[in-house]
């Protein structure tokens, strides 16, 4: 099935990209708000924020700098208050001072009841946990509730749209570092080994995957135990920041994303390196050579025209 484009409407409520943003998507009843913590009071008169919904509190850890998120739900209360009132409670809670902005999901037709928001909260937490992008601050796993098969299908469609909106707003909380892609043309054979690159020297035995965000050094990789005297400071800092993710045998315990191949290889080898030369396929082909082939192929296409 062909992948179709999406028409997303972003309304800058305060006339600036750093302010409040209202987001809607064509043919979807969902309404999404991105609200800086400092701008909550400006939303007091918005009736749609007095409805039921699911919200995300985004911030970062003071200790590690890692992205953190709390995922919650809010129903309409007897006093007529809903999501916004719950966000204001979080703002006053000293235990939740880590968050700097909220993303809220509700609907234009006030569709969500207690069962729906419980289901969505549970599914969003599961997706965020599986993606391993953010530290999830929820202390307990939310219950999914009991829904019919028909209602489940309807809510899963809402979730599909929510993933698109969340990524558009800059939070990749639902997106794994890499995904196994499937060719649109089934007749095209893609060798999965060509997506994996290796370094095996100086005590290191590491694997990585090239993604559209950069290089991901894969969990299970063995990195060099020490660093050379000329090792760049940023490499030392990354190793220090991730010391809890490296065991006593220098095995990496989680996938780590680097913006460049050289940043990834420097982390693995504890030295300043050229990643396009260090990273090689299983057959020994350097990343540099593969990229040169891509350039040559593009030039051939241009010359044919």
Image: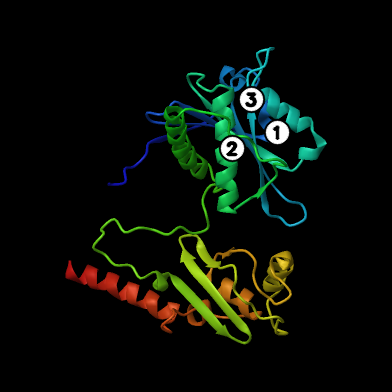
In terms of secondary structure, where does tag 2 sit? helix
Q: Residue at x 49, y 82 (%)?
A: 277
- The residue under label 3 is 83
Badge 2 crowding class, 10 Å Cα cut-off, few under 14, some 14 to 19, many 20 or more, is: some
Whether residue 165 appears in this view of the structure is yes
Q: Residue at x 56, y 51 (%)?
A: 130
- The residue under label 1 is 38
Spatial distance from mark 3 to mark 1, Cα to Cα? 16 Å
Q: Residue at x 59, y 53 (%)?
A: 133
Q: Residue at x 46, y 80 (%)?
A: 280
- Viewer-proximal residue among 278 and 178: 178
Q: Residue furthest bottom?
A: 202
Residue 115 image-quadrant placement: top right
Q: Residue furthest left?
A: 305
Whichever of labels 3 and 1 marks the residue nearer the N terminus, that label is 1
In terms of secondary structure, where does tag 3 sit? helix
- Viewer-proximal residue among 72 and 23: 72
Relative height, residue 239 to residue 172 (above, below): below
Residue 303 image-quadrant placement: bottom left
Q: Which label number is shown at residue 122?
A: 2
Residue 93 image-quadrant placement: top right
């Amino acid at each position: 099935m062909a992948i179709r484009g999406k028409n997303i409407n972003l309304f800058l409520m305060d006339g600036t990209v750093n302010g409040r943003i209202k987001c809607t998507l064509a043919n979807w009843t969902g309404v999404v708000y991105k609200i800086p913590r400092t701008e909550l009071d400006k939303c007091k008169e918005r009736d749609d924020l007095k409805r039921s919904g699911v919200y995300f509190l985004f911030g970062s850890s003071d200790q590690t700098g890692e992205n953190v998120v709390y995922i919650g739900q809010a129903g309409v209360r007897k006093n007529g208050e809903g999501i916004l009132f719950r966000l204001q409670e979080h703002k006053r809670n000293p235990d939740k001072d880590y968050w700097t902005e909220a993303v809220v999901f509700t609907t234009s037709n006030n569709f969500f009841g207690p069962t729906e928001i419980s289901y969505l909260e549970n599914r969003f937490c599961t997706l965020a946990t599986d993606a391993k992008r953010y530290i999830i601050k929820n202390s307990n796993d939310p219950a999914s509730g009991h829904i019919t098969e028909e209602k489940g299908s309807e809510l899963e469609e809402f979730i599909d749209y929510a993933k698109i909106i969340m990524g558009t707003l800059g939070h990749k909380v639902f997106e794994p570092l890499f995904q196994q892609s499937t060719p649109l043309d089934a007749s095209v054979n893609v060798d999965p080994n060509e997506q994996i690159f290796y370094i095996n020297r100086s005590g290191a035995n590491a694997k990585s995957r090239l993604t559209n965000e950069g290089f991901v050094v894969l969990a299970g990789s063995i990195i060099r135990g020490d660093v050379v005297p000329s090792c760049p400071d940023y490499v030392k800092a990354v190793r220090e920041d991730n010391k809890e993710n490296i065991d006593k045998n220098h095995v990496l315990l989680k996938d780590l994303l680097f913006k460049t191949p050289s940043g990834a290889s420097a982390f693995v080898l504890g030295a300043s390196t050229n990643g396009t030369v260090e990273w090689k396929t299983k057959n020994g082909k350097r990343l540099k050579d593969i990229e040169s082939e891509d350039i040559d192929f593009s030039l051939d296409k241009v010359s044919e025209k």
